[in-house]
Amino acid sequence: MKKIILTLVFAFTIGTMINANITIDSKEKNLTIISEPVDCWAQADAAEAAFCGSVGCNTDYWLGKMDSCMGF
Amino acid sequence: MKKYLLIILLIITTNLFAQQSGVVKYEFSYKKFTDTPKNKMVADARRMADISAEYAKNHQYILKFTHLESIYLVEDAMPLDDVNSFEYKFSKFIFSTGIYYQNKETCKTLNERSSMGQNYLVHDSLNSDWKVTTESKFIGKYKCFKAVSLCSSCNNNQEITAWFTPEIPVPFGPAGYGGLPGLILEASKFRYTLSLKKLKLSNKNISIEKPTKGTLITADKLKELQWEKRMDMKSNRG
């Protein structure tokens, strides 16, 4: 009986750890691959529209904001 | 007899102006956004554009011209705070980018500018696509007429409004705008305006240096390259 309980606790602990790792991994993936570029893209659009009137009005502003947002 | 006198008078007047040169200083002004956007990113961007426009008010906007050619440049003022900020960097380009040279004889313009980390020498034609109206107003002592054109440096259908005076018959103006039958004393686009601050005419000849730095490229080709770079960044975003 004690052996069964220990096995169950062990299995539960391992499962929790695996789940926790998956969660952290996917959060990291979200942060590094999706979140930042989407924000920069939207920020560049917003900056261009604020500086010259609409998205597409002057690519200089767009590229400049994109570069500064990405840290170049 | 009267006809001959008129012709002689016209020749004398043209010759007199042919010796003339001038320096125009413009001042920059802008209209603030009146509405408050709910989207935080849009609100932030507008705040940034307003800060940039405030910086732009301190720069010097100078056009030098002879009867044959002109050069326009923006001399930047040192800001009180961060010179490396996006707002300050773009305050110099808020109405135009770089140095503009215009030539009446060739009807060509050259724009020395940087883009995408490179220097370019953008060649184009003096704009002849103006719609001149009968609307007029005085700027200083000069009677000016309103002309409207599509903004050549913009990718969308934005309009540029220019007020020019036939009393100074040179086809030049600030920020690469020209091709009108008189000097442009005021130009507006989007929410920005360059208006006459000081005009000095002289009989002395001044030297106009043609810009030479950068890869020679047409305005259309540069727009194409910029757009390609933009699309590249879009496709590489993951």
Image: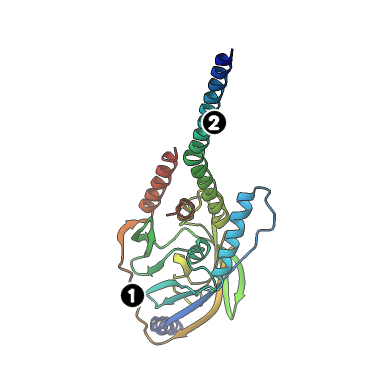
* Relative to B167, residue B49 above or below: above
Whether residue B180 is visible, yes or no, is no
Q: Are marks 1 and 2 on the same chain?
A: no
Numbered badge on residue B209: 1
Compute the Cα span from label 1 to label 2: 67 Å
Crowding at label 2, few (<14), some or many (≥20) Cα neighbours within 10 Å? Answer: few
Foreground residue among B78 and B106: B78
Tell me which chain the residue with mark 1 is part of: B
Q: Residue at coordinates 50% horizontally, 48% vertically from top-left?
A: A56
Q: Residue at coordinates 54% horizontally, 17% vertically from top-left?
A: A7
Query: Which picture quadrant has residue B215?
Result: bottom left
* Relative to B5, residue B131 above or below: above
Numbered badge on residue B223: none
> Residue A69: image x %, image y %?
49, 52
Q: Residue at coordinates 51% horizontally, 47% vertically from top-left?
A: A40
What residue is shown with label 2? A20
Query: Which picture quadrant has residue B189?
Result: bottom right
Q: Amino acid at mark 1?
A: Glu
